[in-house]
Amino acid sequence: MTQPTWRERVRPAEFLGLSAVFALFVGIVVLLSTREFNLALIFTCVGFIVALVVIAMLALAAKPNDDERHEIDDENRPSAH
């Protein structure tokens, strides 16, 4: 089995980063519109969780590229042992 590439190892951090940016945006919008810090904090947390789940589901729904298809085919192929 091959070692994961740098891109494959960083992908979870990308999901967390994108979710955090979305959550901060939601929190700032709520804070500026209501001026209530507690409400903004609640919406920030909910926004982070919702964004993380949506991004993860979209990543699962993505079709594999050619390299991934070859890896899947190699794993499913019966071994000669």
Image: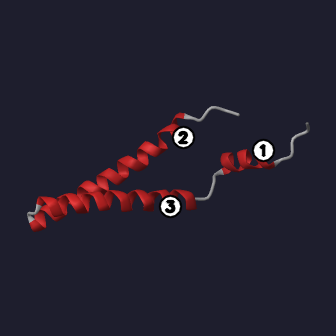
Colouring scheme, one of rainbow, by chain, secondary structure, one colour: secondary structure
Q: Earlier in the sequence, mark 1 or mark 2?
A: 2
Q: Which residue is mark 1?
A: 74
Element type where label 3 sits in the image: helix
Within 10 angstroms of label 2, few (less than 14), some, or many (20 or more) residues?
Answer: few
> Is there CB contact under 8 Å for labels 1 and 3?
no
- Report which quarter residue 27 is drawn in: bottom left
Drawn side of residue 22 relative to residue 11, left or right: left
Q: Amino acid at mark 3?
A: Leu
Within 10 angstroms of label 1, few (less than 14), some, or many (20 or more) residues?
Answer: few
- At a point 18% along the width and 58% down the height, the residue shown is 28
Q: Earlier in the sequence, mark 1 or mark 3?
A: 3
Which numbered tag is attached to residue 58? Answer: 3
x and y percentages locating residue 14 in the rendered image = 42, 46
**Residue 68 position (above or below residue 30):** above
* The N terminus - image quarter: top right
**Residue 62 position (above or below residue 74):** below
